[in-house]
Amino acid sequence: MPDPLNGPAKRVVIGEDDEPIAVLLRDAINDQPGYQAVVVADGRKALDGARDGHPDLLILDIMMPGLSGFEVYDRIRADAATATLPVLFISAAVDHFAEDFLRRGITDVIAKPFELNDVLDRVRAICPPAA
């Protein structure tokens, strides 16, 4: 929803199939001035949201039904329309997939369990609200 003081809200698509985490992230981001977040519960919908929703930031878990977070990431980077879309990974398997992150040059990664303020700080750093 537009913020009359700060211009249009930054759109954030959250690809997360763990409902409590998804709701926590969505609500926390929506409580921040200048942001509007939506949740999709599988990788295919996250990819569609990235392509059709024109988000300013995509937050992905690695392990999701449909397409994995890495499959979504690879397809987004291969598409000229979404190649520069900022992506933040939040996953419980960060250490297990460290080589996959490194190979793709992914540096915006937060391990679960996470501190919510750390996530919000990273969202604001990657995708600052309109001034």
Image (spheres, rainbow, N blue to C red):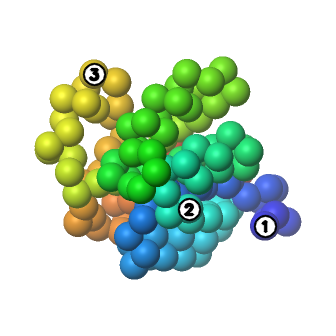
Q: Residue at x 61, y 64 (%)?
A: 37
Q: Residues within 10 Å of mark 1 (few under 14, many from 20)?
A: few
Q: Picture coordinates of residue 110 (x, y %)?
A: 30, 51
Which dot marks residue 1?
1
Residue 95 image offset from top left, x and y in percent: 14, 44
Question: Residue 102, image x and y in percent?
Answer: 25, 26
Q: Earlier in the sequence, mark 2 or mark 3?
A: 2
Q: Amino acid at mark 1?
A: Met
Element at label 3 = helix
- Residue 75 shows up from this direction: yes
- In the displayed structure image, the side of residue 47 where residue 74 appears, left or right: left
Task: Please give the name of the residue rendered at 45% of the width and 45% of the height, measured from the top-left corner.
Answer: 67
Give the residue pinned by disc 2. Answer: 40
> What residue would you read off at disc 3?
103
Q: Secondary structure at mark 2?
A: strand
- Asked where in the image residue 50 lies, by quadrant, the reply is top right
Tags 2 and 3 touching, CB below 8 Å: no
Badge 3 amino acid: Arg
